Structures are given as C-alpha cells and as structure tokens.
Amino acid sequence: MNEIKQEEYYEALLARDATYEGSFFVGVKTTGIFCRPTCPARKPKRENCEFFETAKEALLASFRPCQRCRPLSHPGESDVITRLVAAVEATPEKRFKDADFSELGLDASTARRQFKKRFGMTFVEYARARRMGLAMKEIRTGRPVIDAQLASGYESESGFRDAFAKIMGEAPKRWDGNVLKAKWLDTPLGPMLAIADDVTLHLLEFVERRGLEREIERLRISARAVILPDESPVFDQIEQELKQYFGTGLPVFKTPVTLYGTPFQRLVWSELLKIPAGETISYQELALRIGQPTAMRAVARANGSNQLALVIPCHRVIRANGDLGGYAGGLARKEALLRLEKNWEGSHVTCR
C-alpha cells in the first residue's frame, strides 16, 4: 500500500468516514488491536497506525479485533460471528469441535457457513491465523520458539511446527526472516495471486490455476522465504499495469521480475516475450525459434512452468492445428485473453 493511500486512510480514520467501511482496517501498534474506520475510540497518532485491506492480514500481523467497533461483524447482523470471535479471543489455543459450537448455542454447519460467507475464510482458518499472529509476535521479539509455541496454545512442538508451516510456509526454527509478500488482485477474468519482495515480482497467477499450491511451495523453497499477506510497492505497479492490460491494452509489462527457472526454461520464456500481442505461434514454432526443433515436449513443459502469467505471455502459444492447447488457468480464460489482445488498437506490437 503506497504512502498516498495510507494518508488517505488516516484522514478517513480521523473523520470516522463511514464511506470507507470495508475498504480498510487499521492496526494500532501501541495497543495491539485493529479497528474499522468508524471506531469511536480515541484516534492514534499516524506513526502508530498500520493499514490493512482485509481482517485476515491484520490478524496475521498479530493484531486482535477491537471490542468497541468489532471489526469482524456487521452492524445489525446476527450475533453468530460476534460470539465465535469472542470465543476465540477467550481461548485462542482451543480447537473447536461441533460440541463447542453447541455449547455456544450455535449449529456448527450454519456457523461455519456464515463465517465463510462473511470473511472469505473458514472459522478454522481464522482461529489458526489468530494463534499464528500471537506466535509471530513472540518470535519477532526474539523470544525462544518454545515461548511462541506455548503462548499460542500449542502443547505439542510438532503441532505448532505444522500449523506454523501451513500459514507461514516455513518451520519457525529454520525461518531466517526472509519474507515474500502476497496479495490477491481482482481482474475482469478472475482474481490473481501476486507474490513479491519490495523490488521485484516473483509470481503472478490466476487463483484457479491448476497446481497453484505446489507452485507456491516451489517458490518458497527456491526463495528460502516465508510468504505473508502484506503490501509491496511492486503490487502498486503491477495493479496499474493489469488495469491497463484489461482496459486500453498493454503490450509490454515493465514490472521488474525475479525468475527461478532452469537455463532452458529461461530460454523459452525469453522467446515468449518476443511474441507480438495479438498474435500466436505453435509449440513447434517456439521450439524452432530457440534452435531446438525436436524439443517440442520440453518446450511445452517450460511454457507450463511459467509462473508470471500475462507478464510472460505463455497464453500466446497454441497447437499447430489451431487448437488452443493447454493452459493452467483454463482454456476459457486463454481464449478470452487472446480475444482481448486481438481487439486492442494497434495490438500487433513486439513485446520486448
């Protein structure tokens, strides 16, 4: 999130501007809580504010929901979510079972469904994120991992290690502080996941991509990093370029990238960048262009290994007979991308 946007959010916070409800949450570093824009509490100083676009980001950053403005509930909605959040705050280490929902006077399936619909994450994911937020707070202060484990309610070291890895992507004892940042970006063809550091883009994929979880895991290992919801200046640039791509057209993405492929894969990707927007080539032609005419299958695999969708235009490669061939993001999306590019005014321009 850029500085201009943060200043805008801070002004909205000071004014308790209700039009910003749902746009952001603010974490207050001095109290460890996060609030909605209209919270009636005394406003913090600017330097004590950290802004988030989702509640989950705030939770993973170790903030707990404010008891006054209740950022995890809608005014006038049923008290199901409020009671669930309160239950987690009372015993963050607890693993909720159906019987626990019954003790709260709630039907388990109904409560889980409402929670998922409201926040886009399951109740289990929320509870785990809250526990891991507490653990992250302990680890960031330099305290031993065992302290973080106990503070977040894990009696078993293996259980804590597994839960940490599921959310953070790396076991705490091996975490050296190298962090990549993740953000979901909305596009006309569905949401995309972007992963970056503060300088370069490491991954850009449609969320529905087949094998995305495995791809993220490979990235974690290659980068030796954990991946956390956070902001990066890189996201501002790629968001603007995506808007232009899906709007008036953008033959060339200029967002700086980091590549992890083999020399052969990089050779294929480099050739992909030379395909003019609005045009297509076959896998056979791609193999010829890199000087390896018999390597069609290897070329196809390298094409499918691209983890920077749109930026490296692997969707511009089709079969020799004119069929679309494969696309991890789905053939309907591949067809839509090709149609979009052909409709750009003056689209037949070499990318790089």
Image: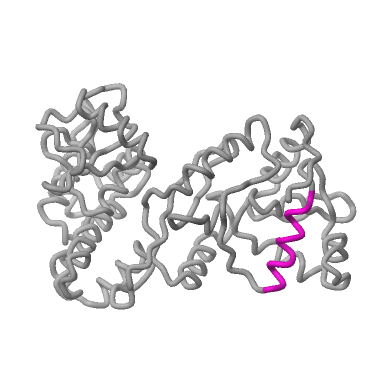
Does residue 132 sit above or below 243 in this rendering?
Answer: below
317 vs 45, left or right, is right
- Residue interval drawn in magenta: 263-275
Q: Quadrant of residue 27?
A: top left
Q: Position of residue 202 (x, y in %)?
A: 52, 59
User: Which residue does the image show at 28% across and 51% down from the upper left?
Assistant: 126
Q: Quadrant of residue 271?
A: bottom right
User: Relative to 226, is 238 on the left or the right?
Assistant: right
Dominant secondary structure of the residues highlighted in magenta in the image = helix
Quadrant (top left/top right/bottom left/bottom right) for the N terminus: top left
Look at 21% across and 59% down and name the residue there.
Answer: 131
Q: In front: 39, or 159? A: 39
Q: Image check: 228 left or right of 329?
A: left
Left/right of residue 56 with respect to residue 184 in the rendered view: left
> Residue placed at 26% from the left, 58% from the top?
128
Q: Is residue 51 magenta?
A: no
Instruction: Give above or below for 117 relative to 233.
Output: above
Residue 75 percent across, percent down from the top left: 21, 26
Q: Quadrant of residue 203?
A: bottom right
Pick whichever, 99 or 87, lies toward us.
87
- Residue 196 coordinates in the image, percent (x, y): 47, 56
Q: Is residue 265 magenta?
A: yes
> Tell me, what colour scheme is on the image?
one colour
Tell me what residue is drawn at x 29 percent, y 28 percent: 21
Total marks placed: 0
Q: In the image, residue 281 lies at what x, y percent?
A: 84, 53
In the picture shown, does residue 263 fall above or below 32? Answer: below
